[in-house]
Amino acid sequence: MKLKAMYAFLDADLQVIEKELEAAIQSDYSLLSEAALHLLQAGGKRIRPVFVLLSGKFGQYDIERIKHVAVALELIHMASLVHDDVIDDAELRRGRQTIKAKWSNRFAMYTGDYIFARSLERMTRIGNPVAHRILAHAIVEVCRGEIEQIKDKYRFDQSLRCYLRRIKRKTALLIAVSCQLGAIAANAPQEVAERLYTFGYYVGMSFQITDDILDFIGTEKQLGKPAGSDLLQGNVTLPALFAMENADARQKIVRVHPGTSAGEMKEIIDCIKASGAIEKSYALSDWYLQKALDILDELPKSKARSTLRNLAKYIGKRKF
């Protein structure tokens, strides 16, 4: 089943969120609006809003209330993408020029900050101080993840724990909070919101590990960028960490730098694939995915629960 078909029953509500997103990024400064809209129109799976909506189904679902949470979480994600593209010096995002490429690094940072601020503003429409604290904490942690990503560039001696902490802050936390805040906005029981948070965390960890695997095994056409781009940019991800347990592979990987040629990168990618690191990485992703599915079994049976299960399996097992 295709991804969007899994939650087709949410289509009308997702259209509401799309319109709200467009409204949320408008600014009196036209160039800022243009840049934010440029990013929004590049599309995306809107995974975080989907998790918000599905989690809201465990309580008193009201799209006019829950839409504010969905918009806030997607705005945080969008802002982090703008900042990531500056950090990674990326020229393309989903086949379109990045904001930093079309305008400048400085303007991209201002745009990302503006979108972050809009996220907080949107969340104030939910009159729940607990939800506000959760979102504020999430933004702090996402920013810490961005800082860690900069600090850890080309740091080949980092530990597995360091990598897992970084992807928690960069990816898993927003998915976890999407689930938690969706439930809170719908006044679901506290224990349900807590379980949904844990479910989202495990799904997010599996999602990012799978993403990091695909960066090595995909083609440029599938990825929209050359294979191994993360490593070339200095982001040492799980397959590289596992591969470096082999001395020969480590010797090759630690020589990667911004000027490494395409031929050298192909040799390094082949080395990582031959080391068994891809299979080992998939095993850890599967472990997180199974933990997520186990948590779902503790929640009441419903269409939302079965959809979350299908969604978790899809994004944890996806190929491209």
Image: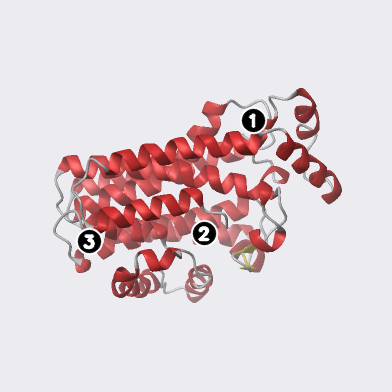
Between residue 32 and residue 266, name the one nearer to us.
266
The residue beneath circle 1 is: 242
Q: Please determine whether, in this image, residue 142 is positioned above or below residue 118.
A: above
Who comes first in sequence, dot 2 or dot 3? 2
221 on left or right of 149: right
Residue 158, image quadrant: top right
Secondary structure under the numbered disc 2 in the rendered image: helix
Q: Residue at x 58, y 40 (%)?
A: 149
| Residue at mark 3 to residue at mark 1: CA–CA distance | 45 Å
> Does the residue at mark 3 contact the one at mark 1 (Cβ under 8 Å)?
no
* Mark seen at residue 125: 3
Label located before the other in sequence (3 or 1): 3
Residue 236 x %, y %? 64, 37
Are the residues at dot 2 and dot 1 in contact (C-beta closer than 8 Å)? no
| Residue underneath mark 2 | 110
* Residue nearer the viewer, 140 or 3: 3
Residue at (67%, 49%) from the top-left corner?
Answer: 217
Query: Going 73% across and 25% down the picture, which residue do you hit?
Result: 246
Across and down, in percent, residue 305 comes to 26, 53
From the image, state whether disc 2 or disc 1 is nearer to you: 1
Distance CA(mark 2)–CA(mark 3)? 24 Å
188 shown above or below 108? above
Mark with earlier residue (2, 1): 2
Marks 2/1: CA–CA distance: 37 Å
Amino acid identity at mark 1? Phe
In this rendering, the label closer to the viewer, 2 or 3? 3
